[in-house]
Amino acid sequence: MARYRAGLRTEARIVEATRGLLGEVGLEGTTLKAICARAAVQAGSFYNLFASKEAVVVRVVSEAIAAVAPDPAEDATVEDLVEAYIQFIQGDPTLAAVYTEIAITGALNNGPMRERIARHHRQRLDIFATAVRQSVPDISPDDAITRAELLLAALHGLAFHLALEPDFDFAGLARRVAVFTVS
């Protein structure tokens, strides 16, 4: 039992080290050597838990995707979804940075990662479009998808702006965009 707990602690240190490195130096700067150094583990211990650097990166990316797209109730409003996005971006800046980095550079350079991010985007688009249709009952399905796509693009752009200027009023503008989406 003690060996199992030690393995879980080591795994958690590796995942946390990877998350931190991805947030600080990006995908290209996150090396196996850097992960092991930050987690204070030997490469052999790493390979006992993960098949490759890519395996732990995928784990961290999966956590980021899950965090940015919580499984909302069917009656989630556009405002609820925007608040969840705000909480993700401001509540865990490191994970938000990882998500943004992987969504931009990882998806461009890695086919399987691109498909994973695209699938995630399509799922979020459907969730947001459903919320738009609930807020604007007479809207056509195509127009709801268009508004949802524009809202997601605006949220991503605002998050990028926040990364460049930490004092930027991300939450205030995100909430205003939500109002425009349903009016």
Image (cartoon, grey):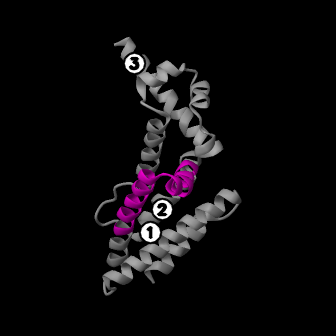
Position of residue 126 measured from the top left corner of the image (x, y, whole percent)? 34, 68
Position of residue 20 measured from the top left corner of the image (x, y, whole percent)? 59, 38
**129 relative to 87 in the view: left or right:** left
Residue extending furthest toward the left: 74
Crowding around mark 3 (Cα neighbors within 10 Å: few <14, some 14 to 19, many 20+) is few
Residue extending furthest toward the top: 2
Magenta span covers which residues? 97-126
Residue 144 in the image: above or below residue 56: below
CA gap between label 3 and label 1 equals: 41 Å
Whether residue 23 is visible, yes or no, is: no
Q: Nearer the viewer, mark 3 or mark 2?
A: 3
Q: Nearer the viewer, mark 3 or mark 1?
A: 3
Q: Is residue 102 magenta?
A: yes
Give the labeled residue for mark 3.
Answer: 5
CA gap between label 1 and label 2 equals: 6 Å
Give the labeled residue for mark 1.
Answer: 79
Q: Secondary structure at mark 3?
A: helix
